[in-house]
Image (cartoon, rainbow, N blue to C red):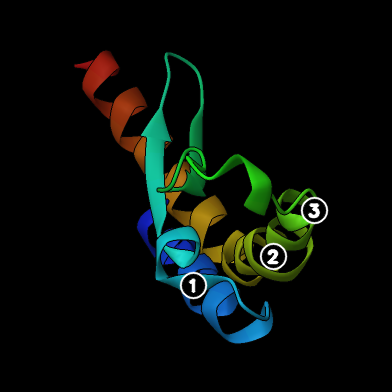
Amino acid sequence: MAEPVRAEAASLAASSIRNIGPDWSRMRVGLTVDTVYVAPRQRGNKKGSRKRRNLAPLLLERAMEPALDHHTGEIERAFGQMLDRVADNFSR
């Protein structure tokens, strides 16, 4: 369910944030016990003097949230179908 959001967020980051570069525009899907999330693949900057403190808000506002909003209906449908399958298997 997260893959379409990841792909669109990466595309939006590259096209809507100036000077982001290829490392920071690539996204990854993460998974915890109760959460699925999309985050930048890049985790830090070894060049301490070249920090972009505004990058996180830009990624959220211009790439991640619009990608999630665009795919909300698709995610809700897929999640509902998954819950139906779980309920069907549980009832057997």
Q: Which residue is mark 3?
A: 57
Looking at the picture, does residue 16 appear above or below residue 75? below
Residue drawn 42% across the image and 13% down it: 33
Left or right: residue 69 versus residue 81 is right
Residue 35 % position (x, y): 51, 26
> Which numbered disc, 1 or 2, marks the residue that appears first in the sequence?
1
Which is closer to the viewer, label 3 or label 2?
3
Residue ID at (43%, 19%):
32
State which tag comes first along the sequence, 3 or 2: 3
Q: Which residue is mark 2?
A: 69
The amino acid beneath tag 2 is: Asp
Residue 1 visible somewhere in the drawing: no
Q: Return the residue at label 1.
A: 21
Place of residue 73 in the rendered image (x, y in percent of width and height, measured from the top left): 60, 64
* Vertical side of 51 occupied by 21: above or below: below
What amino acid is found at the position of numbered circle 1 in the picture?
Gly
Mark 1 surroundings: few (<14), some (14-19) or many (≥20) residues within 10 A: few
**Measured Cα–Cα span from mark 1 to mark 2:** 24 Å
Query: Which is nearer the eye, 28 or 51?
Result: 51
Q: Amino acid at mark 3?
A: Pro
- Of mark 1 and mark 3, the one earlier in the sequence is 1
Q: CA distance from mark 1 to mark 3?
A: 16 Å
User: Against 32, is 17 above or below?
Assistant: below
